[in-house]
Image: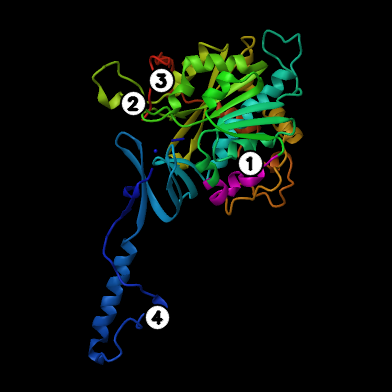
Amino acid sequence: QHRFLPLSFVTTQHHHHLPSYHPSKRHSILPTNRMASNDSDNKNMNDLILKERAKSTFRYTEDIAPGLKIDMALHSILHTSLSEFQEVQVIDSYFGRTLVTDGKTQSAEHDEFVYHESLVHPPLFWSAILSGRDDDVSGEGTVKAGGGAPKSVFIGGGGELATAREVLRHNTIERLVMVDIDPAVMEVCKKYLPEWGGEAVANHPKMELIIGDAHKYLMETTETFDVIIMDISDPIEAGPGIALYTQEFYQRAAEVLTKNGVFVTQAGNANFIPHPHSFPTGDEGDEENKESTCFSPIMNTLATVFDHAIPYSVPMPSFGEDWGFVMAFNGPEGEARTLVNFSSEAIDALVEERIEAVPGVPEHRYRAVGVKRATTGKERGGDVLKHYDGVAHRGLFALSKPLREAIRSDKRIMTVENPIFMY
């Protein structure tokens, strides 16, 4: 979630301006009055043209980390524009149609469902579980099946509309408020990426779509929500999103949640084996580590506000790295362990009971191998979701030992006075 591809992001291996060539008419570009003795030379020239054209491929490259880029074939540029807040592109690449803002991939056809299902369903199902727990919850954090929540959800950001799509798949939802600052992104996504949600989500009767500042909205609202989801830009130094990652903002978010409310935010890269650049060395003069991962600072900061701040992650091929999220909530000590270890069968039962397709959202034109494809738009339960289920839930919270050790060693907290930026 993330920077523009001025056309410097488009590179070619060769820059020869070669004539149009049609293999089915391979001699049509040659003069008809050539001597037969020149046929062999002409054929060699045509073969050379084909060889050179094959090398002249447009590429998309993106900085992932200091010293690391991803590079892939760029099939087409469908849209490029400059909004009031950011540069916006839609491209078609190795990962299919892809939204790029300020030079950073936001979501791609190949795996957007992995990101959005991971961001939305764990907190919404945990809200359901917390609302249904017995008053006599044991010291081990034992809880009953889901209750009536979540009924009200707030989304900060989420301009692609896919986060709202996933929320609206929960049949308990009565009200969804989404506040995003950039209407240009939403219009571009509705036009070029309708599978992310499009008009069907933007105009859903349960949805209140507000163009505005999510920070300002939550600071001023008198409403409360069962779940708050922050699907916002990374805390980069040049970006406006840093205010949505501070201790002060999280304190206000806690006030806006209902009694058993759940907060979740995207939290940047959370690689299985963290690179040294990802964590500060403690050397103030170390420029290489000036911008690092914010996964653990976000978790640490939420932990100063809520009883529990639980990190989790998922591989995101189109991002070129694993991606992190942090969920936060209040409650007895044992409930954190219950969330992480909740049985696959219980999650699958909640999926079957609560998940329904959002009418009018078209299916992606293709899916990765092994991914189900909706066909009617009326699917229910596990047939609706492409990634999240009981087994996937447990995998989300199974952080690697190196990542857990790195998180444990990082004590940083993000405040207005002491912001932390990522690469």
Residue 355, given in percent of the width and then of the height, sits at: 72, 36
Q: Position of residue 243 (x, y in %)?
A: 45, 22
Nearer the observer, 216 or 206: 216
Earlier sequence position, callout 4 versus callout 3: 4
Q: First in sequence, mark 4 or 1: give its number.
A: 4
Residue depth check, mark 1 versus mark 2: number of the one nearer the observer = 1
Q: For the magenta stretch, what is the residue range?
A: 188-204
Residue 198 included in the magenta stretch of the image = yes
| Amino acid type of the residue that numbered disc 3 sits on in the rendered structure | Ala
To which residue does mark 2 refer?
A: 291
What residue is pinned by disc 1?
202
Asked where in the image residue 348 lies, by quadrant, the reply is: top right
Question: Which quarter shows the C terminus?
Answer: top left
Residue 370 visible: no
> Residue, x 39% and y 14% (percent of image)?
417
Residue 365 on image: x %, y %: 58, 54
Give the Cα separation between the discs numbered 4 and 3: 61 Å
- Verify CB contact (< 8 Å) between mark 4 and mark 1: no
**Few, some or many residues within 10 Å of mark 1 (<14, 14–19, 20+):** some
Q: Name the disc covering residue 25, or none.
A: 4
Q: Give the SS element for disc 3.
A: helix
- Mark 4 or 2: in front is 2
> Of discs 4 and 1, which sits in the foreground?
1
Q: Who comes first in sequence, dot 1 or dot 2? A: 1
- Figure check: 299 above or below 189: above
**Type of amino acid at the residue the image marks with label 4:** Lys
Q: Are marks 4 and 2 in contact (CB under 8 Å)?
A: no
Residue at image location 74% in from the left, 16% down from the top: 133
Sequence-wise first label, 1 or 3: 1
Q: Is residue 285 left or right of residue 385?
A: left
